[in-house]
């Protein structure tokens, strides 16, 4: 019996994220199941402005540190065999994954 699975992936490293999503898509295509995605969701930018001088005197010079969080969404109509293959994918430490069963 097939069930619909929604997989959310997010990472600060876009190369690792794209690698994992292509692995997911390849497994689904080889198994012949229906797949929707990967859908790129909006990138979240976290910006932290810091005063460059530690004592606060003189001209106000700021440094900006930025971290971008990239997200992808994949829907798969998967059976148990495909889900076992998906669970065996090697995922780097900086890629986070969330699996949700829809049906």
Image: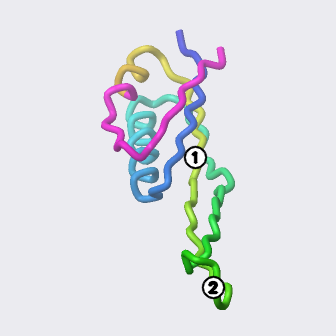
Can you identify the residue that label 2 sits on?
61
Residue 69: image x %, image y %? 57, 54
Disc 2 to disc 1, how far (Cα)? 36 Å
Q: What element carries label 2?
A: loop
- Residue at 65% from the left image edge and 19% from the top image edge: 102
Asked if the magenta segment contains residue 28, the reply would be no
Can you identify the residue that label 1 sits on?
72
Asked if the magenta segment contains residue 100, the reply would be yes
Above/below status of 65 relative to 6: below
Q: In which quarter of the image is the C terminus?
A: top right
Residue 77 horizontal side relative to residue 102, left or right: left
Residue 86: image x %, image y %? 39, 28
Contact (Cβ within 8 Å) of mark 2 with mark 1: no
- What stretch of residues is rendered in magenta? 86-103
Give the class, few, some or many, for how many residues have Cα within 10 Å of label 2's Cα (few <14, many ≥20).
Answer: few
Q: Nearer the viewer, mark 2 or mark 1?
A: 2
Residue reaching furthest to the bottom:
59
Q: What element carries label 1?
A: strand
């Amino acid at each position: 019996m097939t069930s619909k699975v929604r997989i959310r992936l997010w990472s600060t490293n876009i190369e690792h994220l794209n690698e994992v999503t292509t692995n997911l898509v390849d497994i689904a295509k080889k198994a012949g199941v229906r797949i929707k995605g990967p859908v790129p969701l909006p990138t979240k930018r976290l910006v932290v402005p810091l005063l460059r001088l530690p004592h606060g005197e003189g001209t106000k010079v700021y440094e900006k540190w930025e971290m971008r969080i990239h997200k992808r969404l994949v829907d798969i109509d998967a059976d148990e065999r495909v889900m076992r293959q998906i669970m065996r994918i090697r995922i780097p430490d900086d890629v986070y994954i969330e699996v949700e069963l829809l049906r």
